[in-house]
Image (cartoon, rainbow, N blue to C red):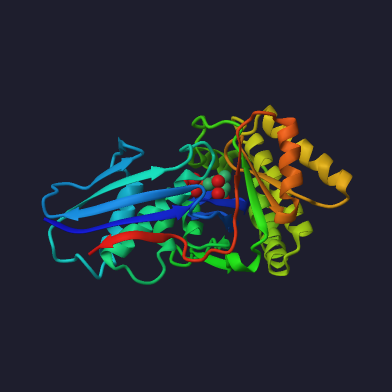
Amino acid sequence: MVLASITCTAPVNIAVIKYWGKRDENIILPLNSSLSGTLHQDDLKTTTTIVASEDYTEDELYLNGKKEDINAVRYQNVLKMIRSRATKLMDKKHCVHIASINNFPTAAGLASSASGYCCLVFSLAQMYGVEGDISAIARLGSGSACRSMYGGFVKWEMGVKEDGSDSIAIQVQPESHWPDMNIIVLVVNDKKKETSSTDGMQKSAATSVMMKERCAVTVPNRMRDIEEAINKKDFQTFGDITMKDSDDFHEVCATTTPPIYYLNDTSRYIMNLIHRYNKLSGSVKCAYTFDAGPNACIYLPAENTTEVLSLFMKHFPGDNIQTYYRGPKENIPSIENFKP
Ligand code: DP6
């Protein structure tokens, strides 16, 4: 007998201060705090359906139609934590079947694990009646996932406690604070990346000479300054810090042994184009940021969108330019259907 079913969606977030490196690999505690903007769930999103039934003999999970190993440590950490905090479905013997799909390329540096684990944890938490902060449970699945629990601009406080209870996501400003901020995603390559974020950051933490300074000085200063820029809606400072942090993050990767290169020639062309365009304009009109892949995410004030898009279309005619807008929309992530 089916006991409950639920379908939820959760959006991708794009970091402007990058999370890179862990101090605890098992419960995913970061070496630095980070900050991101959340997209609309109509744009890049994950949709997850969960069914709990007395007839199921084991938990199962399907990602884009392919069966995943539910015994993998991250899935198990999430399921155990959810079940330990459950206020519903507690005394019934049952398992869950989970199906999750992304409406964008998985593992191509487009933050699929962020929306994926956020959606998984949010759906499970609704089904099991988990109360209080759930961003720390999403963090157990994938660090960046905790930031997708909220809309607008969100920081992930690294925290200091060993049990991770203070390593949580906090909303800096809701979407409605800066509704005319847009994001354009330029899909340069949608193939799966060679070095996963998890592996890459582990290698950087162990070998890059830049890590110490980045975690101790650079990121704490940037977190303070970018939060202030967001509060004041100061795009000049916001854009400047965003591009610098992206550049530093890729420099950390390049100074890792063996070096990790996520950017390609097209990514570097886009970076140069944006610097030239901003210089000619005499102000920061748009700002790039690149995660662990070659695809560019461009933050820009809405009023510059037409001009910037036509610039990209001129330089990349016929290429796969996708535009995703942020805007005033609350309740992220959200429930589409729930039958308790
Ligand atoms: C470059 O959250 O995917 O996108 O915690 O190991 O699952 P794990 O890593 P993940 O790393 C994201 C790294 C990044 C920067 C960011 O989103 O802050």
In the picture, measured across the screen, residue 120 lies left or right of residue 14, that is left
Image point (65%, 53%), residue name: 182
In the picture, measured across the screen, residue 114 lies left or right of residue 101, that is right
In the picture, measured across the screen, residue 96 lies left or right of residue 192, that is left
Residue 35 position within the rendered picture, expressed as x and y whole percent measured from the top left: 60, 58
Mark yes or no: residue 25 visible. no
Residue 237 picture quarter = bottom right
Residue 9 position within the rendered picture, expressed as x and y whole percent measured from the top left: 41, 54
The number of numbered discs placed on residues in the rendered structure image is 0
Q: Quadrant of the N terminus?
A: bottom left
Residue 328 position within the rendered picture, expressed as x and y whole percent measured from the top left: 58, 64
Q: Nearer the viewer, residue 121 or 2?
A: 2
Q: Quadrant of the C terminus?
A: bottom left
Mark yes or no: residue 54 visible. yes
Q: Is residue 76 above or below residue 104?
A: below
In the picture, measured across the screen, residue 279 lies left or right of residue 102, that is right
Q: Is residue 160 above or below residue 76?
A: below
Residue 275 position within the rendered picture, expressed as x and y whole percent measured from the top left: 80, 42
Q: Is residue 107 above or below residue 76?
A: above
Image point (70%, 59%), residue name: 222
Q: Nearer the viewer, residue 279 or 323?
A: 323
Q: Nearer the viewer, residue 265 or 29?
A: 265
Residue 263 picture quarter = top right
Image point (32%, 37%), residue name: 65
